[in-house]
Amino acid sequence: MRRVAGKARGGAGERTPGRGRRREAEAGAGQVGETPRGRKKKEPPDPFADTSPLGLLKREAAERLGLLEKVRALGWAGLSAAETGRVGALVSRLARERGDGGRRDPDGA
């Protein structure tokens, strides 16, 4: 492109709004439960759906540490690294005390 009097040649010189913004306006974005393209948002998984022995230990550990409400609100991913470490340490301790050593059942059940 050659510059002529401070303008780039070959273009209008003005910026047009991005295509994404135009699509959002056309698709009616902003409605609850929908993404800008009109798809439904995925529901977050239930943090307490895991009924395996390990899942039950995790739930008990979160309850003992006072983190149960935070896990209900944000899910397990909402915990900080320090909180996750405390839960993991307590799960290990509880598993050892109960005699299963924290090992999974070889049958996969």
Image (cartoon, helix red, strand yellow):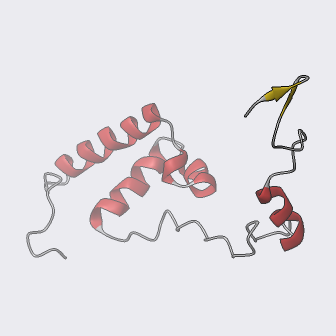
Residue 9: where, in percent of width, then height? 82, 36
**Rendering quarter of residue 86:** top left
For image coordinates 45% across by 45% down, the residue present is 64
**Rendering quarter of residue 89:** top left
Question: Quick check: 15 left or right of 37?
Answer: right
Residue 21: where, in percent of width, then height? 83, 56
Up-down relation of residue 2 to residue 43 (above or below):
above
Residue at the far top in the pictured view: 6
For image coordinates 39% across by 69% down, the residue present is 50
The front one of 96 and 77 is 77
Residue 92: where, in percent of width, then height? 24, 45
Up-down relation of residue 25 to residue 108 (above or below):
above
For image coordinates 85% across by 61% down, the residue present is 22
The quarter of the rendered structure image containing the C terminus is bottom left
For image coordinates 76% across by 71% down, the residue present is 33
Question: Quick check: 77 left or right of 32?
Answer: left
The quarter of the rendered structure image containing the N terminus is top right
Up-down relation of residue 53 to residue 62 (above or below):
below
Question: Quick check: 92 left or right of 17?
Answer: left
